[in-house]
Amino acid sequence: TPCGKPAAYTAEKHRSQSGRQLAKTQLALISKARLLVIDELGYVPVDEEGSRLLFQVVTNAYERQSVIYTTNIEFSGWGRVFGDPNMATAIVDRTVHHGRMIRFEGESYRRTHALMG
C-alpha cells in the first residue's frame, strides 16, 4: 500500500534528473495499489507540478482504488493546497462521491501525552 506525503513526491521530483520519468514511475506503482494513503495533505505547500501529479493520482484512482487522506484542512481550504480552486473542486467531487468522512475532534493525543509540559 503506497503511503506518502504530497510534499515528499514533489521534493523527489525536483531531485530527479527527469521529473516526467519519475511521475510515470510513481504513477505506475501507485496505480497497482488497492489502497492509497495521502498523508498530511496541505501541511507543506505543493507546487504546480506536484498538484498536477496528485490530481492525476486521484483521477486515476477514482472508482478503481480506495484512497485515504489525512489532513486538518477543511475541503473549503483545498484550493489553497493545490493552488487551483477548480482542481481542488474536481478532487473533492471525486473524493466525496463514494467517500466517507471520519472526523476526529478533541485534544491532540501528542499534546496530552507529551513529555514536555
Image (spheres, rainbow, N blue to C red):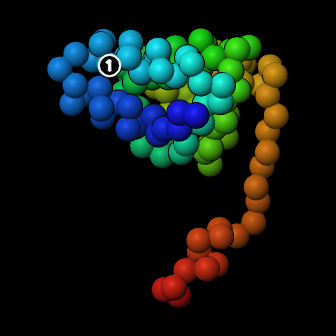
Q: Position of residue 12 (x, y in %)?
A: 30, 32
Q: How crowded is mark 1: few (under 14 residues within 10 Å), some or many (20 or more)?
A: some
When the figure is inspected, residue 113 is found, relative to residue 7, above or below; the finding is: below
When the figure is inspected, residue 104 is found, relative to residue 101, above or below; the finding is: below
The residue at which mark 1 appears reads as 22
* Left or right of residue 74, residue 111 in this image: left
Q: Nearer the viewer, residue 25 or 105?
A: 25
* Left or right of residue 116, residue 37 in this image: right
Q: Which quadrant holds residue 79?
A: top right
* Residue at x-position 59% and y-position 71%: 110
Q: Which quadrant holds residue 109?
A: bottom right
* Residue at x-position 30% and y-position 13%: 21
Q: Nearer the viewer, residue 47 or 54?
A: 54
Q: Position of residue 33 (x, y in %)?
A: 59, 24
* Residue at x-position 53% and y-position 38%: 3
Give the tally of numbered discs.
1
Q: Position of residue 102 (x, y in %)?
A: 79, 45
Q: Where is residue 84 in the image (x, y as percent from the top left)?
A: 50, 20
Q: What element carries label 1?
A: helix
Q: Which of 35 and 19 is in front in this view?
A: 35
Q: As shown in the figure, which amino acid type bears the numbered disc 1? A: Leu
Location of the N terminus (image quadrant): top right
| Res 76 seen here | no
| Res 23 seen here | yes
